[in-house]
Image: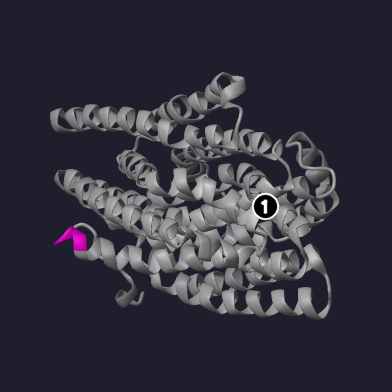
Amino acid sequence: MEKKYEIDMVNGPILKKMLLFTVPLICSSVLQLLFNAADIVVVGRYAGDNSLAAVGSNGSLINLMTNVFIGLSVGANVLAARDYGSGNEKELRKTVHTAMLLSLLCGVFLTILGVIFAPRLLLLMKAPANILPLAALYLRIYFLGMTAMMLYNFGSALLRSIGDTKRPLYYLIIAGVINVILNLFFVIQLQMDVAGVALATVISQFISAVLVIRCMMKEQGGIQLELSKLHIDKAKLWQIVRVGLPAGVQGSIFSLSNVAIQSSINLFGETVVAGNSAAMNLEGFVYVAMNSFYQAAVSFTSQNMGAGRRDRVPRILRTALVCVIVTGIVTGWTMYGFGKSLMSIYSGNPTVIDAGLGRMRVIMLTYFLCGIMDVIVGVLRGMGNSVTPMFVSLMGACGLRLIWLATVFQIPRFHQVGTVYLSYPITWIVTLTAQFVLYLYMRSKMRKS
């Protein structure tokens, strides 16, 4: 194993190593978002606002359908980090092969599900009739790449468990450049509209997946992937599911609440939908920067728990919180400050730009609250508690969000899109407070034990 790609998370200063871990991860996540941004920018500029709305309106639905399975990769990361932290290569090998076969099965299942049910799901979301055919076509082609997407996400999660966030970044740079080139070629040269951007994304996902698999096959030690040894170890599968399924269910139910929010936004017509889609795409860049500290919190806490260094967990939480607050405020407020210029990248329509700025005004200025909430959850998962944070998040964020839509939003004077956006910061505050109380309780139990 090439030690230069590993990070020792159980000894020495935390801040420096956390930044070494998160900076490549932030760059990787931003590149993944650039896949989608390239789709939206190219289709908005060269195919029109209806095509822009068709691509953008799929985001919440895609997240809803994939988050359960991507959540399982969190379970794989936690389990592999513990095995690695304890120095048990035999157990790490079992985790790697179980996780990669599981990712393959999840990807095939999602492809079948997405291709068959795309139009029905979009109808349930109340997608505007004039964008429904385009949205369904984009969604079906996009889901052809689900197997590659799952393989890449699980493979990257396993590499993160040993502190390697650099090589997944290199592979995404290669795939990202190819994605942009294919986007321009399919849409401008071949006039393929939304089908072109979806196909470009699928091809780039397969390239990144192949590169990650090749990397793991050339590794040495417990992290090495041997295709002939792919199997499901029942004990490892249960451990992955026990940690990862609650994370995935939480993510999907969050997405379900976002689907309900998207359905509410759809009521205001194509212009608001297009502006909302572009603003959400910009928010994604802030979110992934903050989410990298959530992933760092998971990996650092898991490795230290596996190595018996529980005393470092409070320091890990404090370091991750400071980092995520600074990141959320700097990136979110800067994005809003340049909001008009950034929105104009996606659309030249002043009404669409104004609609997007309305969302940015509420979300961008308070987004750091979401980062705080996620980091606390990451530490709790690394400590081995994934079920309780899930229930707290579901009640505090999703439940309250749906109640907000069913009550406050229905009042005539508040029946406006700004009221929908306010549901986010309000529920973040409630949920992060509850999660922190849960952390204090677990920390107290850990000290006693």
Quarter of the image containing the N terminus? bottom left
Which residue is located at x 56 percent, y 18 percent?
407
Q: Secondary structure at mark 1?
A: helix
Q: Is residue 241 above or below residue 404?
A: below
In this rendered view, identify the residue nearer to me: 307 or 156: 156
In this rendered view, identify the residue nearer to me: 379 or 418: 418
Local crowd at mark 1 within 10 Å, few (<14), some, or many (≥20)? many
Left or right: residue 48 compared with residue 367: right
**What span is in magenta?**
11-15
Which residue is located at x 58 percent, y 74 percent?
176
In this rendered view, identify the residue nearer to me: 270 or 243: 270
The main secondary structure of the magenta stretch is: loop
Amino acid of disc 1: Ala
* Residue 262 seen: yes
Which residue is located at x 73 percent, y 42 percent?
269
Residue 230 belongs to magenta span: no
Left or right: residue 48 compared with residue 6: right
Residue 12 belongs to magenta span: yes
Q: Quadrant of residue 117?
A: top right
Q: Which residue is mark 1?
A: 274
* Residue 296 seen: no
| Residue 156 percent location from the top left of the image | 48, 62
Q: Quadrant of residue 263?
A: top right
Quarter of the image containing the C terminus? top left
